[in-house]
Amino acid sequence: MTTRNQLLQLAEGAVRVPETQNLSSVKLWCEYAIWGLLFYDDQSPWLTVVEALHICFHRKGQGDPVFTAVASVTSAEHEAITYRLRLNNELRHMLFRDREVIRIANGQSVDEKARWHGWLETVSRDYTGLELGYLQDEFDTFGEMARSVELLRTAEIEAQSAKRWTSRHILPLGPDMLFADVNDKNSLDRKFMRRTGEMLYLMLNRASLRDELGRLIETRLLNSGSPWNRLARRIGGPTTASVGDTHIGYLPMSSASSYDRLAQDWIALLSLRNIPVESLLDPLERVSGLMQILYILERAQETIGDNVPVPPFFLDLLGAPGNNPIRKLSANQFKRHRSMQIEAIGAFIDAFADSDHWSAVLASAAGGKEAMDLLATRFRWKPSRSPNPDWMPPPEEQLAELRTQAQNSKGHSITSTFSNHAKHIGMLRAQRSSGTWYAPSDAFLEALVLANITTPMEFGDFLHRLMTRYNIVVGPEEVRIAFNVKTSALPAPLADLKENERRLEDRLRVLGFLDRKSDDCAFVINPFHNATTTSGAAQLVYA
């Protein structure tokens, strides 16, 4: 028996949508068929990494390997993976909702019994059903407990974001530091953690180096005995409540070069033993976000199918005000990238329009009604229509209406996901009066160095690696190659491009990642790659 999921329109070469995939909330299938279900704009790269590690921690807890075997890169079957999410309400309350602990700890009273009694009484009165009496057995004094809470609060990620307390998170340094994204009734509503991390996990799971990466993830990220996790376990208490099993989302392509590059970056970062794992998570989420937006562009180009390279990211290092050539080139590249995603949706619909099924609809006397049924089946698209077939728009108009709606989607679209993730990783800058363009933060540059440099690399070779690996260009030589300039003029003045390149060199030198030996010889270095190298940056930079 053919199911509804099996009738969906798929991208060329895509795996089938698993029967476990619940599509009841999907109103228009085009975007998900091309890129996957779901790349979500309000789920930051930080929360994406946290969600991916949820799956890894669950699999380890079940005694399974971090990644599941994929039968073949040419397999038409999708992975069937389920995992559970911890609620961890007591810990989350202590970290993000309770404000009495610190107030009482800083008060005048030194009576331990009175402190505990007053605080527990407040909890009982204000938060029905929350039992925190176990904390008296975990800590010798109220002050020790308060200091522990205060310390663990420093591990919050994206502390500046104004999220509800049930959607806030800390560094995923152990299974006791994880929370589900729920509403105030503890129901999984995925407001900010909405499967983009599942896409990240699936990309890693389909990489050729997944076995090596799985071992690194287990040894470096899944350690339940870390000091941070032990502290979280003490504060969180003995409860193990969780949200029911959830099925993983849908990623259409069984293989892609971006999957392998993503896994290579994770391996490179997790292999840096001289960096504490809590400090590695920041560059890890930045390269993960970068590789996901690269995946979005590469899938768009594959769907458009015009056999031209993906337009490069051009980074503005000058930071000069006004509409200067460097900023203008960077802004134009961003606009081109956004338009590609819209073009890809149009190309996906065009491919359907060329199919035999649609041709049969056009040839049918009852084409209007058949078009409505076919578009509902293939794209889950059900606009308001009259039940009278005589009032149905002709098939061409229905398909044009679907195209318009798909390409002009407002709100949580793939284009907003692309923009928001590029901003979060420190690659994209937006100013109300100046527009939006690619301009890297220090932390983004640092992540690129840590993921790509082992032994010292000549600066020109580093620029070439950024171009070939991430499609990032900065200086004139890489611009000439990436823009396929042979006889025509460069897209920006040569002097400006050279100055842009020099500014990158200056930035890396200030960060401690570049060593200039002479006027003609500069090397990009990674001082964290081995214990014998001590020159360069003394600590990681966060932005």
Image (cartoon, helix red, strand yellow):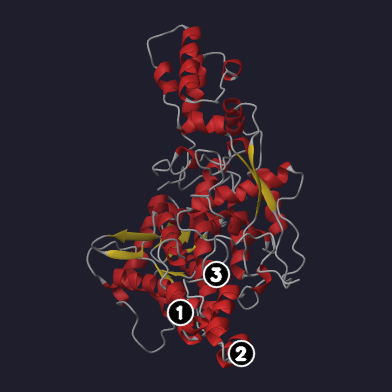
Badge 1 vs badge 3, beta-carbon distance below 8 Å: no
Estimate the x, y position of residue 176 in percent, counting from the top left: 61, 35
**Does dot 1 land on a helix, a strand or a loop?**
helix
Q: Please state which amino acid type lies under the numbered disc 3.
A: Trp
Residue 495 versus residue 59 in the image, above or below: below
Instruction: Count residues near mark 2 (Cα–Cα under 10 Å), then give few for <14, some for 14-19, many for 20+.
Output: few
Q: Mark 3 sits on what residue?
A: 29
Q: Position of residue 461 (x, y in %)?
A: 50, 68
In the picture, measured across the screen, residue 365 lies left or right of residue 405, that is right
Q: Which residue is mark 1?
A: 481
Residue drawn at x 49%, y 11% as measured from the top left: 117
Q: Amino acid at mark 2?
A: Ala
Q: Is residue 394 visible?
A: yes
- The one nearer the camera, 522 or 212, is 212
- Residue behind mark 2: 360
User: How many neighbours does mark 1 have within 10 angstroms: few (below 14), some (14-19), or many (20 or more)?
Assistant: few
Q: Residue at x 60, y 25 (%)?
A: 234
**Mark 1 or mark 3, earlier in chain:** 3
**Amino acid beneath label 1:** Ile
Q: Nearer the viewer, mark 2 or mark 3?
A: 2
Quadrant of the image occupied by residue 91: top right
Q: Residues within 10 Å of mark 3 (few under 14, many from 20)?
A: many
Q: Secondary structure at mark 3?
A: loop
Q: Is residue 434 left or right of residue 170?
A: left
Which one is closest to the eye, mark 1 or mark 2?
A: 2
Mark 2 in CB contact with mark 3 (< 8 angstroms): no
